[in-house]
Image (spheres, rainbow, N blue to C red):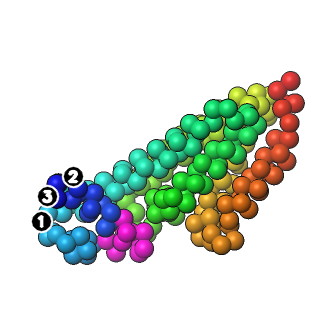
């Protein structure tokens, strides 16, 4: 196995442990045993356990960022009023396809390194900026798009968390219907633009 493949394998094993039990359960001995390697290999590739955790956070942060970018890049041809709904649908699909990645950020596990919280803050700022820009572009006369973006973000986060926790009741159809309803209730028409 190449060192790049071995590195990915160790990150996968670590992510599985962290996802199931939290960072505190991902000890060097447990990771090495689950990956079928020795501890020196782990240290050779990551330096120490903190380096491994940072590498995991960085990898998953990049994955989530790519998935969010994919969701927002599919907006071409979508009616302006439906762009936020379409974005939510894209992120919801990403959550369904990669639940462990999104659990890491929507439910930060116990013992998470500070880098996870830093990446969370950075990604939240990017998402809030995206939402505010979409609101300002679609509804230029909307009062307080900054705080409206914060409300949309908090609501969307809650719905994505419900999807991860209780997918039987928080079905895709139910969540998308709710988001569509709320969009028409909060942003009923484009008359805010005139």
Residue where numbered disc 2 is placed: 4
Residue placed at 50% from the left, 47% from the top? Answer: 67
Q: Residue furthest top?
A: 194
From the viewer's perspective, is residue 31 above or below residue 90? below
Front residue of 167/51: it is 167
Q: Is residue 125 visible?
A: no
Quadrant of the image for the N terminus? bottom left
Cα separation between marks 3 and 2: 12 Å
99 horizontally vs 80: left or right:
left
> Badge 3: how crowded within 10 Å, few (<14), some, or many (20+)?
few
Q: Which mark is residue 192?
A: none
The mark that comes first in sequence, 1 or 2, is: 2
Residue where numbered disc 1 is placed: 40
Residue placed at 78% from the left, 46% from the top? Answer: 183
Quadrant of the image for the C terminus? top right
Residue placed at 73% from the left, 33% from the top? Answer: 80
* Residue 127 x, y percent position in the rendering: 57, 42
Discs 3, 1 touching: Cβ within 8 Å: yes
Q: Considering the numbered disc 2 on the image, is that residue within a helix, a strand or a loop? A: helix
Image quarter for residue 157?
bottom right
Residue where numbered disc 3 is placed: 44
Read off the magenta span: 15-26
Image quarter for residue 71?
top right
Discs 3, 2 touching: Cβ within 8 Å: no
Residue placed at 63% from the left, 32% from the top? Answer: 76
């Amino acid at each position: 196995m190449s060192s790049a493949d071995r590195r990915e394998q160790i990150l996968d094993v670590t992510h599985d442990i962290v996802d199931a039990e939290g960072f505190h359960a991902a000890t060097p001995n447990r990771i090495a045993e689950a990956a079928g390697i020795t501890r020196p290999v782990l240290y050779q590739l990551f330096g120490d356990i903190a380096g491994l955790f940072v590498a995991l956070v960085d990898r998953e942060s990049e994955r989530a960022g790519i998935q969010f970018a994919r969701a927002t890049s599919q907006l071409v041809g979508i009616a302006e009023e439906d762009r936020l709904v379409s974005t939510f649908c894209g992120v919801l699909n990403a959550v369904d396809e990669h639940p462990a990645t999104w659990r890491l950020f929507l439910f930060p596990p116990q013992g998470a390194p500070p880098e996870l919280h830093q990446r969370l803050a950075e990604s939240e700022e990017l998402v809030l900026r995206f939402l505010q820009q979409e609101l300002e572009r679609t509804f230029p006369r909307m009062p307080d798009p900054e705080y409206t973006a914060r409300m949309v973000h908090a609501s969307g986060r809650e719905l994505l968390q419900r999807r991860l926790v209780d997918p039987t009741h928080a079905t895709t159809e139910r969540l998308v219907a709710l988001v569509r309803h709320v969009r028409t209730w909060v942003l009923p028409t484009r008359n805010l633009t005139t």
